[in-house]
Image: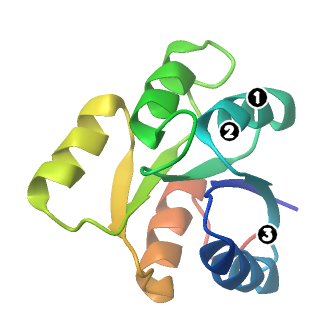
Amino acid sequence: MTKILYVEDNEDNIYMLSRRLKRKGFEVIIAGDGVAGIETARREQPALILMDLSLPTMDGWEATRQLKALEETMAIPIIALSAHALEGERQKALDAGCDDFDTKPVEFARLMGKIQVFLGSGDAP
């Protein structure tokens, strides 16, 4: 089962997205802030990370920079998720090291397409 780490602090978002990903066959691991996201990524080695950008303790931009600087996590694709759909937000996420960007509320079909591109398959193994 393919592991996805979802770094998110909003319980409603966690519930909605993790449920849908689990129905698609993914194992979903949750971290509530950037610091926990880094620790969890190092320990669990997920196939992909969904990173909220507005997080407590350490924001998603800094967590991404640190993940991309660590040898053991630098190759894990990170898709930034943000309620701010401005072009500057997208570019800032990409500059921090995110591999892609998507907006919240999540359009699930579009997000699944991006996930599948990074995982190289049509379905979760």
Mark 2 crowdedness (10 Å alpha carbons): few <14, some 14-19, many ≥20: many
26 with respect to 6 (left or right): right
Q: Name above or below for residue 106 compared with residue 102.
A: below
Q: Work out which quarter of the rendered image holds the C terminus and state it.
A: bottom right
Q: Name above or below for residue 101 compared with residue 110.
A: above
Image marks 3 and 2: residues in contact by CB distance under 8 Å: no
Q: Name above or below for residue 89 compared with residue 16.
A: above
Mark 3 crowdedness (10 Å alpha carbons): few <14, some 14-19, many ≥20: some
Residue mark closest to the camera, 1 vs 3 = 1
Name the foreground residue: 86 vs 56: 56
- Image spot of residue 104 (x, y percent): 39, 75
Secondary structure category for the residue under label 1 = helix
Image marks 2 and 1: residues in contact by CB distance under 8 Å: yes
The amino acid type of the residue labelled 2 equals Gly
Number of the label disc, if any, that sits on residue 26? 3
What residue is pinned by disc 2?
37
Number of the label disc, if any, that sits on residue 39? 1
- Image spot of residue 70 (x, y percent): 59, 14
- Image spot of residue 42 (x, y percent): 76, 26
Give the Cα separation between the discs numbered 2 and 1: 6 Å
Secondary structure category for the residue under label 2 = helix
